[in-house]
Image (spheres, rainbow, N blue to C red):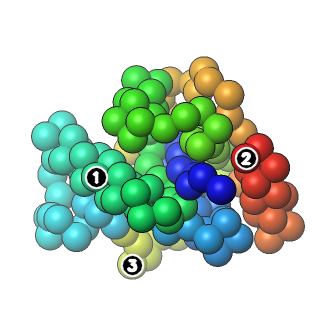
């Protein structure tokens, strides 16, 4: 059976990392998160374009190695632009059946609450970052799964895993 790459995208605070961490053991995958990669590479991130490009390039490189090693992986990042989502698929040289996109959504009041409660987290995003990214976020145009994380349960995560595994 071929290796799967799952792209989990969405705005800050919508639950991407929660979905990624819950899904990973169910599909035997490694999670690559831009927030974690950023903190590993930069002790004081500046969040500029060059830095962002490097972080995404590192994530893509790691995903390539995992793919070649036969290991499923989940890419946990905002992927705000449709171009960046297409670029991942192209750079990894994947067939459509081997890449799955999950877009996480959540009502803004819940996002605000989540962002306020963040402590000792890899992400530095606050509500001002959320609003800025919301203005530039482009809808996912290709086939994908949309997950409302406002009341996410373990059953919901298992259902996502089942849908992904059925598509293979």
Distance from disc 1 to disc 3, alpha carbons, whole Å, reads 27 Å
Distance, label 2 to label 1, CA atoms, is 23 Å
* SS at circle 3: loop
Q: Earlier in the sequence, mark 1 or mark 3?
A: 1
Q: Secondary structure at mark 2?
A: loop
Residue drawn at (72%, 39%) of the image: 145
* Mark identifier at residue 168: 2
Q: Residue at x 17, y 58 (%)?
A: 45
Residue 160: name its quadrant: bottom right
CB within 8 Å, label 3 to label 2: no
Q: Position of residue 114 (x, y in %)?
A: 57, 62
Residue at left 56%, top 55%?
Answer: 3
Nearer-N-terminus badge (3/2) = 3
Instruction: Report the mark closest to the observer, 1 or 3.
Output: 1
Q: Nearer the viewer, mark 2 or mark 1?
A: 2
Q: Is residue 18 visible?
A: no
The residue tagged 3 is 120
Residue 85 % position (x, y): 45, 32
Seen as rendered, the residue at the extreme bottom is 120
The image quadrant that residue 151 belongs to is: bottom right
Q: Are marks 1 and 3 in contact (CB under 8 Å)?
A: no
Viewer-proximal residue, 132 or 137?
A: 137
Find disc 1 in the rendering and name its residue.
61
53 relative to 55, above or below:
above
Alpha-carbon span between mark 3 and mark 2: 37 Å
């Amino acid at each position: 059976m071929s290796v799967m790459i799952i792209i989990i995208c969405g705005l800050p605070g919508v639950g991407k990392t929660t979905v990624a961490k819950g899904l990973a053991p169910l599909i035997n995958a490694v999670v690559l998160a831009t927030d974690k990669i950023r903190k590993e590479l930069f002790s004081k991130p500046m969040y500029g374009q060059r830095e962002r490009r490097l972080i995404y390039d590192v994530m893509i490189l790691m995903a390539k190695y995992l793919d070649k090693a036969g290991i499923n992986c989940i890419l946990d990042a905002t992927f705000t632009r449709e171009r960046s989502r297409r670029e991942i698929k192209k750079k990894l040289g994947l067939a459509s059946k081997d890449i799955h996109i999950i877009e996480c959504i959540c009502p803004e009041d819940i996002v605000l609450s989540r962002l306020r409660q963040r402590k000792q987290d890899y992400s530095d995003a606050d509500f001002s970052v959320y609003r800025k990214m919301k203005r530039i976020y482009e809808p996912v145009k290709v086939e994908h799964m949309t997950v409302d994380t406002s009341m996410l349960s373990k059953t919901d995560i298992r259902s996502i895993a089942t849908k992904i595994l059925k598509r293979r």
